[in-house]
Image: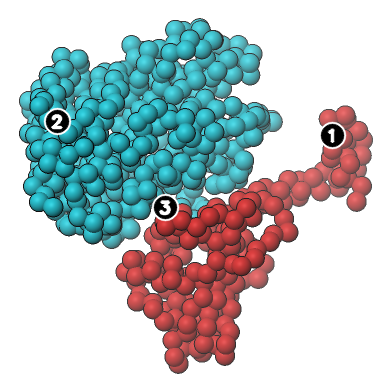
Amino acid sequence: MPTSLTETTRPGLSVGPTSEFSLFFHVKLGQEEGLREALRALQDTPGYRPGDYGMAVATIHEARFVLFDNDTRLAFVTSFDGPWDAYMEDFFTSGPTLALFDVIFRHVEGYEGLPDLAALKALIYGAQETAAAYARNYGGTVMEIRKQQRVNDAFQQVLDDPKAAEALQHRALKPLLDEAGA
Amino acid sequence: MATMVDNLTARQSINLELDDIQSGALHERPSPYVGTYLLLRIDNRAAGRELVRRLLGIVDSARPSTDSARDAWITVAFTYEGLKALGVPQDSLDSFAPEFKQGMAARAAELGDVGESSPAHWEKPLGTPDVHVALAALSPDSTRLEATLARARRALEELAGVTLIWRQDCYQLPTGRTSFGFKDGIGQPAVEGSGIAGSNPNEAPIKAGEFILGYPDETAGLPPMPTPDVLGRNGTYIVFRKLHTRVAAYRRYLQAKAKDREGAALLGAKMVGRWQSGAPLVLSPDRDDPELGADPHRNNDFLYRDDLRGFKCPAGAHARRANPRDALDNDGSVNVGLHRMIRRGTSYGPMLPEGVLEEDGVDRGIIFVFAGAHLKRQFEFVKTQWLNNGIFIGVPIDKDPLAGPNDGSGGFTVPEKPIRRRLRNLPAFVVTRGGEYGFAPGLRALRWLAELET
């Protein structure tokens, strides 16, 4: 259920524990190519390299930067576990996140540079737009999904054992046996 | 050695105006203690200002005193309605934190104060616009408390237009513990520049601006401060909550889930993160260690880095939720220093006698008191993000097993080898009886309030 707007918060829509978070900026005139280059460089950093699956912020499901309107606009779109507005100041005081913000957002209008956190906060709040619709195809936080992956990897290892079928006959393991066939 | 270094840092790095800050904000609760909370309504603006003028004579500053009579003190705080009743100009009223302006009752749904804990069931006048002024008197003994309260009574004498509307006495139980049976108030942050050492030598002092307005905070900026400067500077926001504890239900729950007394004590400790003596599970995972619990140099001297999976102290334990220390350092999403709280909680009501498993109809519990510069990212963050759900520990449906607003839907996981223990359908052991957000101004600000001419 979407969280209601109050004077103190401007949260995005949420599905279960996860909320959407989208920022829309105007690119500084003449900095389109610089921004593209910064994003190309970002894509090559740990956590952003395809297949890394390890962004600095462990509660983000995915993140994308989109240039649009002939590179005059930049969108940053992500899904986050928890209400993102509760964590804003944590991001602003986190080294890795600030460093990331700095290399990208220096190319957008309104960015005054570090370390003016009040200005940065105003910029982010001003750029945030709540989605008009939001849906998810799986439940669970990043932390839960990582745990599920670890458990499934362990389960597959068990199934690879020649004695697995015999071992899974125990009554207590029936739910696992039910998942073992395919 | 670490403690010495930290104490030095806590003293030296910033110049706090201790003479202007109210004593209660930085003064540790004595142990043992007795105390009284009084709530007042201002019906007449001039009388309210006269009250503030008189209170100026009995409110102490945070400057340490050698006079033992000063070991008892009074703190005064105002609600938003109270500041309005005093005639604080609108532009100044508008400059306060949004949550403070709304008041705790209006924040109830956000805070998880629903169902039996909802404001509709609160003890009157808590949560109503009648609450204007809160006075808290704390003392090591009843003699000094009485002397302090007598001064407060004199401040109220022949002051038509100011009415005492609520009183709550509190005292430390003979056991020195809360109604649930646990030593409390152990973990307190060191505040930079206050001269007060924190209880954990592993933690650097927290910037003064996290607790007192007008100083840099952990973001390196200044916390948003009410205007004019004279009103906001050296003030602090206060959270006051009366929390009823269901001690018999709690004891029955432990008994039902444990095989024997030792098992019940262990499960109780897993839910809290400490044994009843105060000994932390991280330092004494298998059995209580009363000597450790009683030793202020050791009973908070720990981090969670060697126990990230929670085999000693579960991630969902009350104390670990309320202050995860370094447990979330690898998450990249949380700066724990932004969510610390100065707590000045006390107990009210008599102890439920040892071994009693049925409610006796007597009200008992905890008066939770918080002081800090940021209602939203300190008290409200801890309450809503860490106590009221388990998103941050990977189990969204789980709430704090002891203090959370449990409704039977959540559970509690106790990591154990070979197989974790999972408790389900946790009931609520704490019910909110009411509460208020307040602002405890500095002494110059009190004078400014007394001299308002609107």
Kindly state the secondary structure of the residue where label 3 is placed.
loop
- Chain ID of residue with mark 2: B
Which of B74/B141 is in front?
Answer: B74
Decide: is B338 above or below B37. below
In this rendering, does residue B415 appear at all? no
Nearer to us: label 1 or label 2: 2
**Decide: marks 1, 2 in contact (CB < 8 A)?**
no
User: What residue is shown at x 47% (from left), y 72% (from top)?
Assistant: A127
To which residue does mark 2 refer?
A: B160
- Chain ID of residue with mark 1: A
Q: Is residue B227 left or right of residue A48?
A: left
Sort mark 3 into few (<14), some (14-19) or many (20+) by Cα contacts within 10 Å.
Answer: many
Which of B314/B348 is in front?
Answer: B348
Question: What is the image's colouring?
Answer: by chain
Residue A173 circle label: 1
Distance between the alpha carbons at the discs numbered 1 and 3: 41 Å
- Chain ID of residue with mark 3: B
User: What residue is shown at x 36% (from left), y 32% (from top)?
Assistant: B126
Q: Residue furthest bottom?
A: A30
Percent x, y of residue B365? 41, 22
To which residue does mark 3 refer?
A: B335
Which of B204/B395 is in front?
Answer: B395
Percent x, y of residue A26? 47, 82
Decide: is B169 above or below B414. above
Kindly state the secondary structure of the residue where label 2 is placed.
loop
- The hue in which chain B appears in the rendered picture of the protein: cyan
Task: Identify residue type, mark 3.
Answer: Asn
User: What residue is shown at x 21% (from left), y 37% (from top)?
Assistant: B43
Percent x, y of residue B192? 23, 46
